[in-house]
Image (spheres, rainbow, N blue to C red):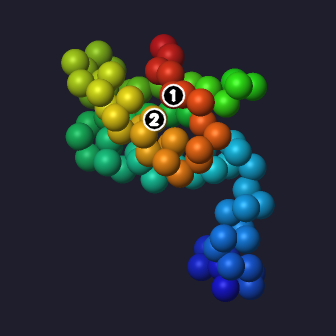
Amino acid sequence: MCEKCGCGESMNEAENEMTFEEKVKEIIDSIRPSLQAHGGDVELVGIKPDNTVNVRLQGACQGCPGATLTMKMGIERILKERVPEVKQVVAVK
């Protein structure tokens, strides 16, 4: 049974029915608390037709020397692991 709403679907069935954008949003929302714990945040700006994910780093993440590392080794790595269709993650202003 789906733990989120009790609808009777297994979690795998529910995940398979999610759109690409819904999957990306869900994963970004799961990453946000880690960034917020350090005074930062991330916002999904949009997704390009080639599956490039555009995000905006906020708070302490803006201008942080480690922001590029956070983007590539953190956010992008996690998104690609969980949604293999993601081409890349790009920080936009």
Q: How many marks?
A: 2
Q: Is residue 40 above or below residue 81?
A: above
Cα distance in 3D space between marks 1 and 2: 5 Å
Q: Name the side, left or right, on which 13 lies relative to 92.
A: right
Expressed as whole percent of the image width and height from the top left, the position of residue 12 reads 66, 70
* Pointers 1 and 2 in contact (C-beta within 8 Å): yes
The residue that appears at 26% across and 46% down in the rendered structure is: 37
Front one among 61 and 76: 76
**Mark 1 element type:** strand
Expressed as whole percent of the image width and height from the top left, the position of residue 1 reads 67, 85
Inspect the image, locate mark 2, and give the three-letter code of the amino acid beneath it: Glu
Label 1 packing within 10 angstroms: few (<14), some (14-19), many (20+): some
Inspect the image, locate mark 1, and give the three-letter code of the amino acid beneath it: Val
Residue beneath label 1, please? 89
Query: Which sits earlier in the primary sequence, circle 1 or circle 2?
Result: 2
Residue 55 seen by the camera: no
Q: Which label sits on residue 76?
A: 2
The residue that appears at 46% across and 53% down in the rendered structure is: 30
Expressed as whole percent of the image width and height from the top left, the position of residue 70 reads 32, 32
Residue 42 seen by the camera: yes
Label 2 packing within 10 angstroms: few (<14), some (14-19), many (20+): some
Expressed as whole percent of the image width and height from the top left, the position of residue 92 reads 50, 17
The residue that appears at 23% across and 40% down in the rendered structure is: 38
Q: Is residue 61 above or below residue 29?
A: above
**Mark 2 element type:** helix
The residue that appears at 74% across and 79% down in the rendered structure is: 9
Front one among 76 and 28: 76
